[in-house]
Image (spheres, rainbow, N blue to C red):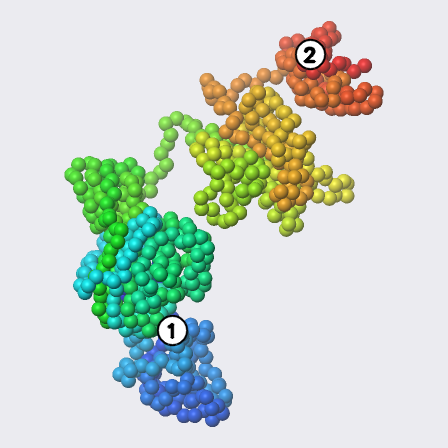
Amino acid sequence: MKLTLSWLKDHLETDATLDEIVEGLTSIGLEVEAVDDKAGLKPFVIAKVLTAVQHPDADRLRVLTVDAGDGKPIQVVCGAPNARAGLVGAFAAPGTYVPGIDVTLSVGKIRGVESHGMMCSERELELSDEHDGIIDLPDDAPVGTSFAAWAKLDDPVIEIGLTPNRPDATGVHGIARDLAAAGLGTLKDGSVAPVAGSGACPVKVTIEAPELCPGFALRLVRGVKNGPSPKWLQQRLIAIGLRPINALVDITNYITFDRGRPLHVFDAGKVKGDLVVRRAREGETVLALDGREYTLSQEMCVIADGNGVESIAGVMGGEHSGCDENTTDVLIESALWAPLNVARTGRELGIITDARYRFERGVDPEFMAPGVELATRMVLDLCGGQPSETEVVGYAGHTPKAIAFPLTEVRRLTGIDVPKAESLDILKRLGFAPAGDGDVVDVAVPSWRPDIDGKADLVEEIMRIHGVDKIAPQPLGSHDAVNGKILTTLQVRTRAAKRALAVRDMMEAVTWSFIPARHAELFGGGQPALKLANPIAADMSDMRPSLLPGLIAAAQRNADRGLSDVALFEVSGTYEGDQPENQRRVAAGVRRGTATLGGAGRHWSGNAAAVGVFDAKADAIAALEACGAPVDRLQVEAVGPSWYHPGRSGVIKLGPKTVLGTFGEFHPKTLEALDVSGPLAGFEVFIDAVPEPKAKPTRTKPRLDLSAFQRVTRDFAFVVDRTVEAGALTKAALAADRKLIAAVSVFDVFEGAAIGPDKKSIAIEVSIQPVEKTLTDEDFEALAGRIVENVRKQTGGVLRG
């Protein structure tokens, strides 16, 4: 949002300096992004051409002597056709930067004749596109004075970065209201006096889609004379980056920025019959004012007549009914449009206009009809004509929101005491209407603030005007208990999982929560409830059911840029439904190429192996262990989800029902559908599925008990069916005596004819740790017998002979 200082003072009576206004705007939440104080125009002075003679070596050049006010004639070579003796114009001396041609002047020779500066055209000073001749000022223009000051071009321009919740600040009047509330002046009366009309408006309006158009105001003005707008209006529009077109169009642009009220003008002579506000028909087209033809859908709202679509409602008018120099009768339109529909229409068509910017944020409904009155007054003043009465259709009036506001909320939410009288006065200055004398007052929200919904919004309004800089810094308060718990269990686990995976030489990635629909369907998603109503891009249509699609795509992007061996992880949310309880906290990771824990790439002593299922399994177990899962009691089932390779994947469980994660190498069809290549293995663990740790009676660490007896190992080899998992065998051996057996590990697997068909041999090492006494041979034999018997019962394995 741009405005000039003089424009602001049309609405704000103030003696504040530019610096004070800029600081005040930022302090009340209207952050100033840039200020152009027009210092670049200060070097240009008004000068008079004393003589003008033909250049000796160029037919199109003249040699001028110029008086810049100091009585010393200056020689200037000029090619402008209107350069003549007696002309008064704008002069730039050597050393001056000329913005229109991006050149800093110096003394130079043009065809052998020295030139000490230049006489400037309007385009060279970026005042307009006019460059056929140099600026020609009235004879009484004061020679030697600042051209910018004389032409009132030294008006500073302020650019404000508006947040989407402040539609009231899209007009200069709304900004002035905020500054007045902050004590930087007095807000001038912004009411609009009605303009008397003669006869009813002959063009009627029918609203067929009231859900998209809550109100419509229309007025005919006959006998206007359209042409260039006055200089003051053109200068203001140029200052904020708009191009003057003609008086009628410039008036609507001016009111758009002056009051935040977009308007549209139709050439009444080009309108056929009455106007109809309706939904567009599928495939209907319109040639818009930007010269492009747009194809519309039935979700879009349009203004149509007997010729068809004349305007895309709230976004852009049509070329057919646009006003030009031949317009004599004009229809002024001021309407209300559904913000979401305007935003969706503009996005689908790729149109960004000042009207859309305001309508999609919400304009003041109570200024719909006054906007027509204001535009009518300006049309009559600048173009003449005779107005009809105003036709208002569909508008049922505005019912202000009422908020029960406990004044104690200011202290509770901000920690600062604002006196009750001051709080109420601030709200009144901003246009709110508080009623009541108690600690809880009823506050009526003004029509221009659709962003205000509750108590916290009112507190914010009070604090930004009172001044957030008045909140005194305070030290962080101490907790009631020493080492009291600050983070939640989920926060602790999230940090722990990130650290554990980073230690395993994986790099953290942050991927989009939105993925293409086909990717979501591959990983168990794609439900209608998880589709975005208004996606930011066509390939970001669904909420992700898994972190893996984003990580796999990220790994492939790295590979495409030469980083083929990459290990990535992410700890974030996934979505199984549209309810809060359907969101999960997941730690996931992928390894590509040879990015194993032991190192990646080629080496003279031996190349690294490609990543596989066991790399993913180790990552998953490490993440679970960091989150506090009892890894010694985890069960692994060799049947993973469909996106994994069926023979190289698994599911990690705690008990028969609690699934803690999945891991494996990805199915070739999954990789093909994702358009990725290379060895890829990955995992997902569900952090929020890990059971909460049991509360301990004390925070003191348990006593360290070390056995005084030597640990002993014994090896066993069992012949089992090929379908028996090694994990089942080690679990059976461990269960033989949990007090003595400290660990069981597999060190050999053998299959062959010597073992028999559909059989295999699994060799395990059993670590035995005595804790009470040194074991005798009889004790070892008894323990070995229990191990063999336990394995036989649970797996069918027999001791290999």
Name the kind of residue labelled 2 in the image.
Lys
Residue at position x 20%, y 60% in the image = 192
- Residue 141 horizontal/vertical position (percent): 28, 81
Name the kind of residue labelled 1 in the image.
Ser
**Label 1 sits on residue:** 128
Q: Nearer the viewer, residue 526 or 19?
A: 526
Left or right: 490, with 737 as reference point: left
Question: From this viewpoint, is residue 353 visible?
Answer: yes
Quarter of the image holding residue 1? bottom left
Q: Is residue 381 above or below residue 264?
A: below
**Label 2 sits on residue:** 793
Most distant residue in the top direction: 778
Residue at position x 64%, y 44% in the image = 676
Most distant residue in the right direction: 754
Quarter of the image holding residue 613? top right
Residue at position x 20%, y 43% in the image = 434
